[in-house]
Amino acid sequence: MENNNTNWCQSVTGIVIKDNKVLLARHTYGSGKGKLIVPGGYVEHGETPQEAVKREYLEETNIVVEPKNIIGIRFNAQDWYIAFQADYICGEPTSDHDENSEVLWVEIEEALSREDVPDLTKKLIQCALNCEQGLAPLPYQGNPSKGKGYLYGIKAI
């Protein structure tokens, strides 16, 4: 879904694992067309990355998720992409018939060996599996004039 409120330089995803399966969607356009990828998308202006993950998952898959720790960041001079570990809350996987043609739970080992799952998706699944805690949200007040602030870091033991 395209709108004028999209921040084309900020995008997010969440890796959702339940019962040893990962939620993937078959992409319908661009370089990912026909591939099974983790759902996600662009952040809207005024939206936090966490809010964007929740919105994108609901819009694209009909699944309610709760983003947790950051498990990966891909960036360059033009844009950034944050990957969260996200908890499944509720919902039945349903395609949006726009950005994806199907949404399904795939056994983790199968997802990591399939040729129609891109390398970035495989690496993010591995990060979710191998990361004990990732970068976790830490208490932080931020600047009240800029809205709620977020700080992610390594929790002290």
Image: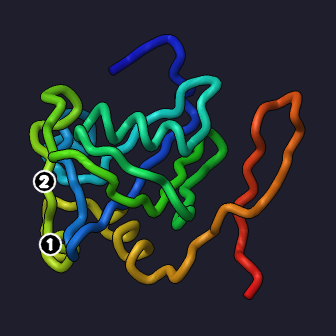
Q: Quadrant of residue 55?
A: top left
Q: Nearer the viewer, residue 61 or 98?
A: 61
Give the x, y percent position of residue 12. Answer: 48, 45
Q: Quadrant of residue 27?
A: top left
Residue located farthest toward the front when viewing the structure as drawn: 90
Q: Which label is found at residue 21?
A: none
Q: Residue at x 22, y 45 (%)?
A: 91
Amino acid residing under circle 1: Glu
Q: Residue at x 24, y 45 (%)?
A: 32
Read off the residue under disc 2: 104
Give the x, y percent position of residue 69. Answer: 55, 64
Read off the residue under disc 1: 107
> Label 1: few (<14), some or many (≥20) within 10 Å?
some
Q: Are marks 2 and 1 in contact (CB under 8 Å)?
A: no
The answer to whether 60 appears left or right of 114 in the picture is right
Q: Nearer the viewer, residue 20 or 113?
A: 20
SS type, badge 2: strand
Q: Residue at x 43, y 41 (%)?
A: 54
Residue located farthest toward the top when viewing the structure as drawn: 4
